[in-house]
Amino acid sequence: MNKTNSIPNIDFEGPQKIGFEILSIDSRDALKMKYLKVPHRASFYCVLWLIEGAITHLVDFKPIHLVEDSLLFVRKDAVQYFNHSDTYKFRILLFTEAFFCKSEGDVTFLQNSLLFSDSKASGQQSVGRMSKPLRELWQEMEKEFLLPDEQFQSDILRNYLANLIFLAQRVTWPELPVIGPAKSGGNLIVEFRELLEQHFREEQNVKFYAQKLAVTEKYLSRLTARATGRSTKALINERLMLEAKRMLIYSDVSSKTIAFDLGFGEPTNFTKFFKKQEGTTPAAFRDKFPLAG
């Protein structure tokens, strides 16, 4: 894998008025798609159903081994990379946050779903198995998607997708309860995450985000804890750490440059922050990571 100076961002290119698309891609198609040849950051959610073959897919520098009829759920803004030494065929479902989040609790539903969770508590990226009910649901959803601009199509697709997420989580973790949408605060969480994506490099203070959202710091932290299980400050730190790791693994820029890019006035402060969060220095993390070469 070649390192680059930056990680390309991929925007949703499907039907913009819907924000939802289902595609069929094989290993030959992937080689023709420029953004699939390098680590890239997608601004939308992905559900990948491997139909044939086997593949090692990298999601935020974690190798995930998929076999036939595996289902992989990838959250938005994760850095992905396809292993082009593999031969495979898969169906991929893409959807934007704007497509799914039509009510206040929808974003909380996505954040609470272990399938898309970026929480440390959720462990490895979610890999499930295609079952008969999931297969039938996917096929019905695909039939609806292929219809020519029918009335209520977006609403029907959204309901199919929600059912797919519920069912897949129940199949993957039958011992855990499926958490549905929260009753309130969902829109505020969406706004916070958008602000965090825009400003995490220069603003790491909870007060900044609370003021932007016209709420108290305590109220904002209560909302984020309810939606994600983490405090606002923890989410800010996790976002910084994720970007730092991405740059250390997928780029060849120096730790000093990364420190300044992430808003640290001094590289030593970045090193202290990284070591406190990860238990090792940025240089040691980069050196020991097997995907860094």
Image (cartoon, rainbow, N blue to C red):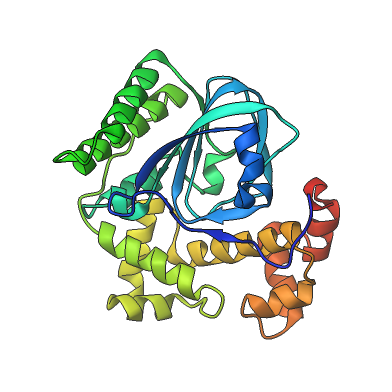
Report whether residue 142 is seen: yes
Most foreground residue, 133 or 88: 88
Along the horizontal axis of the image, is 211 left or right of 5? left
In the image, residue 135 above or below residue 42? above
The residue at the point 49 percent across, 62 percent down is 235
**Residue 56, x across and y down, in percent:** 68, 33
User: Horizontal and vertical percent for residue 241?
Assistant: 62, 62
Q: In this rendering, would 285 be left or right of 228?
A: right
Q: Residue at x 71, y 30 (%)?
A: 86
Coordinates of residue 87 in the picture (x, y in percent): 68, 27
> Looking at the image, which residue is at 78% across and 48% down?
291
Work out whether residue 278 or residue 150 is closer to the camera in this orientation and state it.
Answer: 150
Q: Residue furthest top?
A: 132
**Residue 58 visible somewhere in the drawing:** no
> x, y percentage for residue 88?
63, 27
- The image shows residue 209, relative to residue 78, as above or below, that is below
